[in-house]
Amino acid sequence: MKRNVSLFLSTLLLSLIFAATTAQGVFSQTPTQLDPDTIPKWINELAQAPSIYAANNITDSSGKLIRQEYVVNIREFQQQLAAITQNFTI
């Protein structure tokens, strides 16, 4: 029984030492800051301006606004994403 407790405590101690030394190496590094001028903004321009939705006002008999309704059409599309490769240290 004493041997199991001793083995457990020594394993726990080694685990804590390992965790402390590993965490210290990670948190002691300075973060890499991105230069906003090197990030590509637009690869492909939009073919047309995005549509702006106009509200359909629903009123009661006295003309008081009850709610606004919008009709939104959806469709499937494919999106091209630019691959940005940059090395970061964590």
Image (cartoon, rainbow, N blue to C red):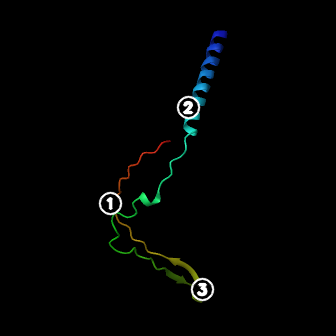
Would residue 20 appear left or right of 56 to someone viewing this image? right
Q: Is residue 34 above or below residue 12?
A: below
| Mark before the other along the chain sequence, 2 or 1 | 2
**For the point 47% across and 56% down, which residue is it?**
35
State which mark lies toward you, 1 or 3. Answer: 1
The x, y position of residue 85, in whole percent, is 38, 49
Label 1 to label 3, Cα distance in Å? 43 Å
Residue 9 against residue 35 in the figure, above or below: above
Residue 86: percent from left, percent from top: 40, 48
The residue under label 3 is 64
The residue drawn where x is 61% and y is 26% is 16
Kindly identify which numbered label has been placed on residue 22.
2
Q: Element type at marker 1?
A: loop
Name which quarter of the figure residue 28 lies in.
Answer: top right
Q: Secondary structure at mark 3?
A: loop
Amino acid type for the residue under numbered disc 1: Gln
The residue sitting at 59% across, 24% down in the picture is 15
Horizontal relation, residue 74 to residue 20: left or right: left
Spatial distance from mark 3 to mark 2, Cα to Cα? 66 Å
Tag shown at residue 78: 1
Dot placed on the residue nearer the N-terminal end, 1 or 3 = 3
